[in-house]
Image: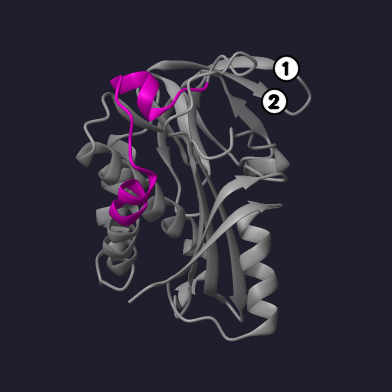
Amino acid sequence: MMRIIKLDAIDSTNLYLRRLSLKERLVDYTVVVASSQEKGKGQMGANWVSEPHKNLMVSVFKGHLDLPANHAFYLSRAVALAVVATLNGLGVPNLSIKWPNDILSDNKKICGILIENVFKGHCVSSSIIGIGLNVNQENFDELPQASSLKCVTGRDFDLDEVLIALLGDLKAYLAVLASTNYQAELKTAYERLLFKRGEIAEFTTKTGAAFKGVIQAVSTSGKLQVLVAGNKVEEFDLKEITLAY
């Protein structure tokens, strides 16, 4: 049985779970889910804005990972694939993964993932996996690249049913990390869904310079491999470039 903690308004499910981990020894798949959060965060500290009681904001504790530190991005691949599996099961169309781990439907963002790892020696020992999924929200006036399950399907969803499906898929995909061939399995599946792979994509560097390139793959450590001018493949990490929609 999973331990599921349901809360109303909270600053952040990831922060709550982190504070809880300092007070007690968490069991695997301790889950925190909130109806509303005031300080939700995405990648690079971006705010995650969500209407109360309409979306799924959940954080999951996963221990006993023993994943080599240089393979930490395989955890990100597994989580992204788990979300896609859940959404496929719910009939959500045209899914893709925008590097590193935003989930898109019809090229609009419906899910963000924030993973915070704890390292012990040269391994990831445990992780807090935060998932923000837009479910029944319909108003995204200030976020033109955002969407939700309701927007793309026209249906209302039961948040508890979505949560249970997501947790089941998350357990299944995280179990892959314990297998001997997890690298090939997760890399292939992840890159098959990679947004703009094999197409000309537009990027912006941290200095504001724009350039175009063709996404080839993602490295073991999670860097985006892009074919740029001169037929040269260069690698970029999340702090270096932004991929346009």
How far separated are the C-alphas under marks 2 and 1?
5 Å
The answer to which quarter of the image holds residue 97 is: top left
Query: Is residue 14 among what the camera can see?
Result: yes
Residue at image coords 45%, 54%: 220
Inspect the magenta stretch and tell me whether residue 164 lies in it. yes
| Amino acid at pointer 1 | Ala
Residue at the right extreme, as displayed: 207
Q: Is residue 69 above or below residue 21?
A: above
From the image, give the main secondary structure of the stretch colored magenta.
helix
Where residue 117 appears, as percent x and y from the top left, is: 59, 65
Q: Position of residue 190 (x, y in %)?
A: 33, 43
Label 2 sits on a secondary structure element that is strand
Q: Position of residue 207 (x, y in %)?
A: 79, 24
> Does any portion of residue 197 appear in the rendered image?
no
The quarter of the rendered structure image containing the N terminus is: bottom left
- Residue 205 tag number: 2
Q: Is residue 197 above or below residue 11?
A: above
Name the residue that disc number 1 marks. 209
Residue at x-position 52% and y-position 40%: 53
Numbered label attached to residue 60: none
